[in-house]
Image (cartoon, grey):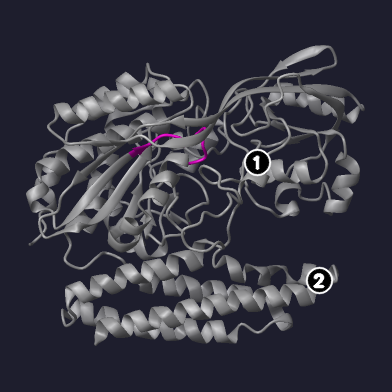
């Protein structure tokens, strides 16, 4: 079967997609009953187009912010609680303490104190002495790392000062998806609120004067039945294998740019792919998630758990669709993609826009709930506004809506969407999906990943210095590169069976994605912290600090174990490649 992508592209329209955007622009989608109603509306649109849809209805754990306030100095300040903050309707009263945040890292989920606070605090001991029994006020978005630090340091509440005049919704838990028994202890135990910058400045001034405040939060929490529509478009040659394309349907308020536009992209993909299904080699599954905003990806995590065996055996890649088609989002300089998918993504974006993208490593964020299974992945955020335009408008950095600071606020309404940008992004997504669903050989280039591994190992060795020798990791990576060069040479010459080659390319994902993006075992979900490349080797960058703290030997033991995991993974990858070449 020779792929004919142009026939699919010629069938694209924004008519159905834009109608969905307009409908969702008047439909709040954060309370459980409203999300289910929106899922029903989407299913009806799919069925009207003649597309079969399977609707799952699991119970997932949600935390729905309702109200919050800060009372200080005789003034009641408006606030929003992030999801999963402790529910304290009567409030907590205590003295305020201000720690200045590192302004360059307001969105950071880092567990490193210096990343979040710069020189404001030098150690956990110093922070605990300052914060015990007090309310921490600091700049930021009330994120998981910041919340956990405040809690560990003995703060009784956290006030996050957002950088603009609006207050952004968000989440403050490190728990990924619905919690299991091991996760439950990590649920935040203190009230957390966000305030805007003008009010935050007043609270910071009050903290410096030794003032007090009362922080109040109100959230609805529990397990809720939520609908998950999934469309399966069967391939004609390898129907059991599939590419998963997905995005979240729940949003903060009406959430047009985050993520009604993404839902609309998926609807149009379903329509055009269903109409052309006879020309697909592999199947395509398209899913719309609940629980992204109020459950920290609980919908996609449920799917990863419930269909783990199918995903492990049959999924060739996952493609996330979040915040496409937004106003002024004409640049692709922050395109999310794993290394092995970057040649494909670059080819597609350059073909559609005439300009090559610039890539960013996938964050521990979005609905990337499949890393521990080991799925090659690309997109989450794709199009965004150029940095020059963002600077001209005086916008601070956000994590969606194409760079519009309406992200996670009531202002994410219809004007944030752009029909022309949406049309372009639909084509980019379609061409990317078609590559996975129609090409004889899967479009995954593990040579790119191995090169990234080698650069990471060399950087870690430079940081470790004489404390630790990473030569075995460097040599194993070089051997992997050599084996991959042979494999791809055979693929390019057509001298290796496509079935055996694709089996190997998928198996490599199950080995190399977890080693590059996770610490937990497969089929579990890592906490929502920032994660460095090859995370079990990353302690190499901290050895000087551990030496100064008298913990060098323990750190070296940890690094030895991390290197053992890495070497084992690369040996297994080599065996997979050898098997394909037999």
Near-viewer residue (406 or 40): 40
Q: Is residue 39 visible?
A: yes
Residue shown at the point (41%, 21%) measured from the top left = 34
Check contact, mark 1 vs mark 2: CB within 8 A.
no
Q: Quadrant of the N terminus?
A: bottom left
Q: Whole-percent x and y of residue 578? A: 31, 85
Near-viewer residue (269 or 187): 187
Judging from the image, what secondary structure is the residue with disc 2 in?
loop
Circle number at residue 42:
none
Can you say whether 398 is above or below 527 in the image? above
Can you say whether 109 is above or below 21 in the image? below
Relative side of 130 to 80, left or right: right
Relative side of 190 to 497, left or right: right
Q: Disc 1 marks which residue?
A: 187
Image quarter of residue 264? top left
Circle number at residue 551:
2
Q: Does the magenta stretch include residue 469?
A: no
């Amino acid at each position: 079967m020779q792929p004919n992508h142009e026939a699919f592209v010629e069938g694209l329209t924004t008519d159905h997609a834009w109608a969905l955007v307009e409908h969702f622009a008047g439909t709040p989608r954060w309370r459980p009953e409203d999300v289910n109603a929106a899922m029903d509306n989407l299913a009806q649109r799919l069925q009207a187009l003649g597309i079969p849809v399977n609707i799952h209805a699991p119970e997932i754990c949600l935390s729905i912010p309702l109200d919050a306030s800060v009372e200080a100095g005789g003034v009641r300040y408006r606030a929003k609680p992030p999801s999963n903050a402790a529910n304290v309707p009567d409030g907590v009263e205590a003295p305020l303490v201000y720690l200045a945040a590192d302004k360059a890292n307001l969105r950071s989920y880092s567990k490193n104190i210096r990343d979040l606070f710069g020189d404001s605090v030098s150690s956990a001991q110093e922070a605990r002495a300052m914060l015990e029994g007090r309310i921490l006020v600091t700049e930021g978005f009330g994120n998981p790392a910041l919340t956990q630090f405040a809690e560990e340091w003995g703060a009784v509440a956290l006030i996050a000062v957002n950088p603009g005049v609006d207050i952004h919704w968000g989440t403050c838990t490190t728990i990924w998806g619905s919690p299991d028994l091991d996760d439950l202890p990590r649920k935040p135990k203190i009230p957390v609120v966000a305030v805007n910058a003008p009010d935050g400045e007043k609270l910071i001034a009050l903290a410096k004067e030794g003032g007090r405040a009362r922080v109040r939060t109100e959230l609805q929490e529990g397990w809720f039945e939520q609908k998950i529509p999934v469309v399966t478009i069967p391939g004609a040659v390898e129907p059991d294998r599939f590419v998963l394309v997905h995005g979240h349907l729940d949003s903060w308020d009406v959430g047009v740019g985050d993520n009604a536009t993404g839902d609309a992209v998926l609807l149009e993909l379903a329509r055009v792919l269903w109409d052309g299904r006879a020309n697909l080699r592999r199947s395509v599954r398209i899913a719309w998630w609940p629980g992204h905003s109020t459950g920290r990806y609980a919908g996609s995590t449920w799917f990863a758990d419930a269909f783990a065996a199918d995903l492990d055996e049959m999924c060739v890649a996952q493609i996330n669709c979040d915040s496409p088609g937004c106003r002024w989002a004409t640049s692709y300089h922050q395109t999310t993609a794993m290394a092995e998918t970057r040649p494909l993504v670059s080819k597609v974006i350059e073909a559609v826009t005439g300009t090559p993208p610039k890539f960013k490593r996938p964050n521990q964020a979005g609905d990337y709930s499949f890393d521990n299974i080991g799925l090659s992945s690309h997109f989450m955020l794709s199009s965004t506004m150029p940095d020059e335009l963002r600077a001209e408008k005086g916008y601070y950095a956000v994590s969606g809506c194409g760079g519009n600071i309406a992200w996670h606020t009531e202002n994410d309404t219809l004007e944030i969407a752009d029909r022309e940008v949406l049309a372009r992004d639909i084509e980019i997504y379609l061409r990317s999906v078609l590559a996975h669903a129609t090409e004889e050989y899967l479009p995954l280039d593990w040579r790119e990943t191995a090169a990234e591994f080698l650069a990471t190992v060399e950087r870690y060795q430079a940081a470790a210095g004489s404390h630790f020798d990473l030569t075995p990791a460097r040599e194993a990576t070089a051997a992997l590169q050599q084996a991959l060069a042979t494999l791809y040479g055979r693929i390019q010459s057509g001298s290796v069976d496509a079935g055996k080659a694709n089996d190997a390319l998928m198996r490599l994902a199950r080995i190399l994605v977890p080693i590059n993006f996770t610490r937990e075992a497969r089929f579990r979900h890592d906490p929502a912290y920032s994660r460095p490349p090859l995370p079990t080797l990353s302690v190499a960058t901290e050895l000087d600090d551990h030496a100064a703290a008298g913990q060098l030997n323990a750190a070296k033991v940890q690094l030895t174990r991390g290197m053992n995991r890495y070497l084992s993974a690369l040996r297994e990858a080599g065996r997979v490649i050898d098997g394909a070449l037999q």
